[in-house]
Image (spheres, rainbow, N blue to C red):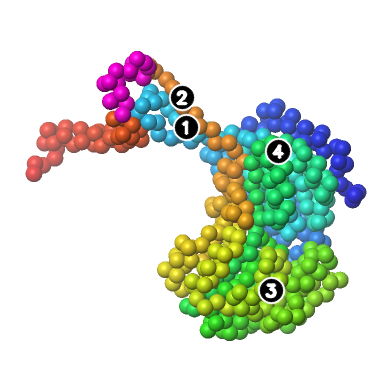
Amino acid sequence: MADYFTPVGDIPAAVAAARATFRSGVSRDIAWRKRNIQAIQRMVQDHAAEFELALHKDLRATKWWSTCVELPGTLEECRTALKHLDEWAAPRKVASPVVLLPASSYVLPEPLGVVLIVAPFNYPQNLLLMPLVAAIAAGNVAVVKPSEVSEHSARILGRLLPEYVPEACVVVQGAVEETQALLRERFDLIIYTGSGAVAKHYLRAAAEHLTPCLLELGGQCPAIIAPDADLKAAAKKIAWAKWTLNHGQSCLSPNHVLVDAETEPKFLAALKEVMTEFYGKNPQTSPEISRMINERHTKRVAALLTDDLDIVVGGQVDVSDCYIAPTVVRVEAGDDVDVMRDEIFGPILPVVRVDSIDEAIEMVNDGEKPLGLYVFTGSASVADDVLRRTSSGGAVVNDAAIHHGNHNLPFGGVGGSGMGSYHGKWGFDACSHLKAVVHKYGTDPSLRFPPYSEGDLKIFGLLRKVGIDTGTLWTIGKVAAVVTVGAVAYSYGLIPGM
């Protein structure tokens, strides 16, 4: 056990403390939520250099990644929540069916309770703090477990979160044993980012208490290149999403490219040119390339470079440096090769030859639903066809992975790539119970209560059949008002006769 791990025997008390804070009612106060979100903002801003250094020690993170992706994403989530929290938390009025009148109806967001957040190693700060902001915004208290694989980030989060948000968050540090102890406790929501295999353990544990889960799991995200695509632009964006974004260790990383045989050589030529332009002739010395998280993961990905692969560029491995060169391999559709069996989660990019867009779509649909799907084409109809005939957590046309940066969009998976979504209001709603409320007032009509005459039943049936609600009545009222005003104006000669 590492020296900073939480003793297993202390974990039940830690969760109980979070539960006690929630039951005190303090987190229901909107001002409390805002203060804690502002505290997270200050923590990131006050210790930005320490966070960047930790990320560099964990993953050899590039300056661009730490200053433009990891920390800014958290700050943007804080700003969005602070700007819209009053609106998100307010009752959401909806129409009432006429058979329920007199009444008003609304949706009341309420906090779930204690939320468990388990972060991955690849974005160890961002993917802990962003869901934490959502949980706090919705009025919950969180128990967070940083990734022990990214030790330096785990240590700084474990030190600073209790200092900045002591009421809103309890930090539990550890690995498998500590996680198992956590999962024996009862939570009101579990947010887990990681692999599908591990997610199944979380679902099994959650089932014991019927706890809902928000799972962000990644998958084999494909990039489909149509014959009419701008190949140089496609090569730039795929290279950026594959290697600049954490060297393939991203749930949204393009896992492979699907391209027809005629377009393939032109795309490969453009890609090789872009790789040299971005990372130089020796990418190992490039400041734009990060590293694999550790030697074990380096060996795992390197083992995919089997002798039967057609390596177009790259392939160099330095395990002691946790380095695998940006690598492109050529694969035929249907090839039974290790590199195509599972999510790669590393810097190898298979380029798969297919006969057509239709075959590319079939390959996507034959596998698990990916977290992201990317289609490059100059034709809106081709893009629409791909989006309509495939299913994925999110999709981007003529770029890759960038939908993660839009806090107005839900971010999450479907099927094998996860369940639920967050970011912005979507995160607030995911961490809330949206309670249906009907507020009755006044006196009910007598026909509501028994005994019911044949006439009463006919009236009920007619009202149900017509489906009038307060929204319809409001519209009818507005139209009637306009007609009345027009009639009065006409009677006084204010509107010329026809």
Displayed quadrant of residue 65: bottom right
Q: Name the residue: 8% across, 44% down.
A: 498
For residue 337, the mark is 3
Residue 23 in the image: state x and y as whole percent. Answer: 70, 28
Q: Few, some or many C-alpha atoms within 10 Å of disc 3 (few <14, some 14-19, many ≥20)? A: some
For residue 426, the mark is none
Residues shaded magenta: 446-461
Alpha carbons under labels 3 and 2: distance apart: 62 Å
Mark 1 falls on what kind of element? Answer: strand
Q: Name the residue: 47% across, 78% down.
A: 228
Mark 4 falls on what kind of element? Answer: helix
Q: Mark 2 points at which residue?
A: 439
For residue 208, the mark is 4
Q: Do the residues labelled 2 and 1 touch (CB within 8 Å)?
A: yes
Is residue 432 within the magenta segment?
Answer: no
- At label 1, the amino acid type is Tyr
Residue 41 in the image: state x and y as whole percent. Answer: 69, 47
- Name of the residue lying farthest toward the left: 498
- At label 2, the amino acid type is His
Mark 3 falls on what kind of element? Answer: loop
Mark 2 falls on what kind of element? Answer: strand
Q: Name the residue under label 1.
A: 106
